[in-house]
Amino acid sequence: MSFGPHLFLALLEGTVTAFVLALTALGLSLVFGVMRIVNVAHGEFYMLGAVLAWACAHAVGTPVAGFIVAMLVAPLAVGAFALVADRWILRRVNYHPESTIVATIGLLYVLQQAVLMLYGPDARPVAPPLYFKIQFPWFGYSGYKLVVAAASALLLAATWLLITRTRLGLYMRATQQDLEMAQAFGVPARRVYALVFALGAMLAAAAGVLIVPIEQAHYLMGLDPLLMSFIVVIIGGLGSLRGTLVAAFAVGLSDGVVSVFFSPTLAKIVATLLVAAVLVVRPGGLFGEERA
Amino acid sequence: MSAWRKVLALHLAVLLALLVLQFVLPPYHHTNVARIMVLAAYAIGYNVLLGYTGLMSLGHAMFFAAGMYGAGLPVYYFGMGAPAAFACGLAAGVGLALLFGLMALRTVGPSFLIVSMMFGQALFLVTLYFNEITLGDQGFILSEKLRPLELAGTQLGFHEPAVKYNLALAIFTGCLLAALALRLSALGRVLIGIRENEERTRLLGYDSFRYKLLALGVSGALSAAAGAGYALLFSYVGSTFASILFSIYPLLWTLLGGVGTVLGPLVGTALMFYLVDTVSGVTSSYLLFVGAALVALVLWFPLGILGTVRSRWLPWLP
Amino acid sequence: MSQNRRQGAATAGPEFGRRRTLISLGSLAGAVLTGSVLNTRFAFAQANRPIRIGFQVHRTGVGAVYGRWFERTTTATVRMLNEKGGIAGRPIEIVAEDDGTDPKRGPEVVEKLARQHKVDFVYGTLFSHVVIASAPRAGELKIPYFVVSEGYHVASGKMNRYCFQPGITDVRAQVTAVASWILGKLGKKVTLIYPDYAFGYDHRDYFSQAAEKHGGRVLEKLAIPPAERSFTKYFARIPADTEVLYHVMVGPGVLTFVKEMGEHFGKKRPQIFGFIDSLEGVDMASSGLEYLDGTYFWEAMPRYLQGNEPAYVKEYRQRVGVNDAGASLADPKDVSTYSHMFGCWETLHVIKQAVEKSGYRDPAAGDYRKFIESLEAETGFAEGLAHPQGAKRFNGRLHQCYGHQHLSKVEGGRLKVVHRTAIEDSLYPPEGDYTRQSL
């Protein structure tokens, strides 16, 4: 295949990656922005979404119905779990940064191994709700992948509306800007924290549900999205939504292009070192607030 | 007895106990304790950064791996002798720590953590990418290529249990005493000042960046010493030791044993080693146990074992 | 009257004395008899004490699917062998420890099995990186270590004299055997897709060597990093004039791999040849695998019952609990790792044969020497219930066995064997000699 079509393929792949990455990383970024904690178990919420999607598809039987059920059930279930985790663990340690990191690392292993014990070590496929192939002159491409990109865009837009147009969004932004001031104004900080944590988990789970017909549900699938989300959030700036989106696209597209033309391992090494470079120049990330 | 004499006596007693232990231990536990001592040295290195300086890293496996590959590659390809290889591993670890520090220490808190995780992951990927040299995740063994040590005319083969144990003890002793010396020194007090309140320490005139870099250098050196030791004593060098899980272990061991105490890492490493050993005989999912242990520690037992001992009964414990 | 009786008793005289002596003699005899019976019983118990085999199993980690089936096969083999009297009249006891498919934990498990559980032999490791990390420790502990892996490690001569792989063939032999058939029957211009680590390199290197020998040409070598989840970009790099696509993808991404392969090629595709390693434990009838119909796979042992198998193969399948489709009898959705697990069955039978031939009794240096030398003197194993995969040739110097390989075609969601290679097809010049090492 010559250069032109190759590049086109790379851009297609990159776009799909970017949308899904944005959806996954957004949850992490929100949680950090509002709660000032890093949730290392974030990738496991994504994995749980995928595994629950498989369970729903398995229980329901038909792909379309299974997908719809999964899209409703998985995020809600994962969100509920996140609420419980927030109540029983995070609140207990008062959202202390280091303690939450350690606690969420522990959660990561508990979730991963629980899934291993209940679901098993196999990677199981889920049939996509819509399957069609787009035949370009140079190669065939999965239509569902473009559906995923569109669905992610919709969810991102919905989240943006939530943050900018609703009261919850207002509370979230206020808490992020100045917690004490927000509390003085009557914002129920604790409840906001819980809901934000749940929202972050739900976004990750939704990304998992979307992705699972393309990849399969496997108990170790959460690590890579976690690392990629970290890269995106750091480059974009912890706490900045706009930064997250911009960075997701930058990382997704460049990863797509570099890994088509060079080795993907090399692409990953470059991406992680890029994080360092960004932080040397701007310790707060590209769009982040400067923090001493 | 003055405080520091008590401290010195305690630590020397521990070392003496370890020395004597090798004559009473049954064979299975003999090798286990050797492994524990080397891994505890790694945890001690980690604790210098977390416990003393207050910086949490999730990429420390990169220093361990730097020591491991730094020692292992010259032996495998050039037949270098063990002492020289150890020095190479140590140098690699210190070099990496300083390089990393120059870049990463501008960030604080969660950013530092994430950057350390990224660097750790990058090094892991590098060991896979250059697998023509490093043999990637399959790894390579040193036992054929390692010449025995020559000491006072006698040949000490690395496969002999007594040699393994005592060299492991030597590495552990070096790291323990280094950590103790650091803790008790003026330098150590500055580090603790930085941990408690960096702003105030800076106001007092200390260049916190330089001190943090120094701490990172020491931490990297001790971890690399452990890595080099592990490669030379247990013969296997592979990418697994550069993975994120291997960065999480010293955090777990340090927290369990008592973060900020000198002997805490030893207690934590030993306890966790035997817990995993026992648990994996019962359930097939010992990582679940590791995860639950982390959550439980942070919820109910944040000071760890020796930390609790120190706060309740022995305030002089460093 | 009573006085008479008393008098009678008192005046028992010599009869009494004789009776006493008789009684004493009798009890002495009884004691001796009992003693000797007890002694014999004790000696009997000694002879019947179990042979303990340490099983280093991948219960968790990336190898867990294999570990599960290795464990089932091991249990079935031991049950059968014990029904038939065990090894040298001694029952077999399996002591299993999970190594988590982790090269750090591997040597610790070997240590625990050898030193704490004091087993006679250690066996059962599959994943190459764990094998390579664990083997040296077995050598240091001087305990025979039986590998059930496909990697080219034991056969490379780079392990130690205590390591054996007598129950399963190595990847170099497999690739050598299939290469000649592929290049002869499917096409001469080949593109390789393989994982970017040791297992993949073995395929890359040995196939390239074989291609040169048989007049083929490798057009492109595509290495895929371990954690890769999407493969579309790799398919784009396949040259248009490829006649055969040779793929060895393993891991959770395999189903995506196949699906995207189908999306890329569509109807116009080259011949496609893969290794069943990609689909061990995976149902051929899974959604997304329809594209594999008409493609070929290497199998060590045919998963689907072909119909012309000898009775001992059917008995083997029955005992390990697989149905005609190679899935669990208890749960047809639970597909087995059929091309690997026979290695456990056959290795345990080899251990039995070697113990009985060499007179091995206890884990002591002298017994181990007899055991190892006896095993090194073997030249092969006949097909039969002990070796249901097929006859084996055994290279005693290299500690590696060689066997038949199968080439199968996917038809209607099932695998049908189209060719069975001769053992000679898989041979290559040996690169080592363990008998030169001292024990």
Image: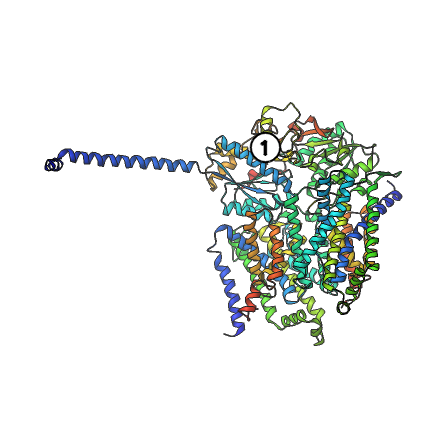
Q: Is residue B197 left or right of residue C78?
A: right
Q: Nearer the viewer, residue B7 or C365?
A: B7
Figure check: B74 above or below C218:
below
Tell me if I can see residue A123 in this picture: yes
Figure check: B128 above or below A283:
above
Q: Which of the 4 quarters of the picture holds residue A55?
A: top right
Color style of the picture: rainbow
Identify the residue shown where x is 52% and y is 37%.
C372
Figure check: A41 above or below C194:
below
Q: Which of the 4 quarters of the picture holds residue C419?
A: top right
Q: Identify residue type, mark 1.
A: Val
Q: Give residue A43's position: percent from left, percent from top.
A: 72, 52
Mark 1, other Cα within 10 Å: few <14 / some 14–19 / many ≥20: many
Q: Quadrant of the C terminus of chain B?
A: bottom right
Name the chain letter of the residue that bears numbered label 1: C
Q: Give residue B9's position: percent from left, percent from top.
A: 51, 68
Q: Give residue C200's position: percent from left, percent from top.
A: 71, 41
Q: Nearer the viewer, residue C60 or C272?
A: C60
Q: Give residue A259's position: percent from left, percent from top.
A: 80, 47
Q: Residue furthest bottom?
A: B204
Q: Nearer the viewer, residue A270 or B85?
A: A270
SS category of the residue bearing label 1:
helix
What number of labels is visible? 1
Which residue in the structure is indicated by mark 1? C320
Tell me if I can see residue C148 in this picture: no
Q: Which of the 4 quarters of the picture holds residue B229?
A: bottom right
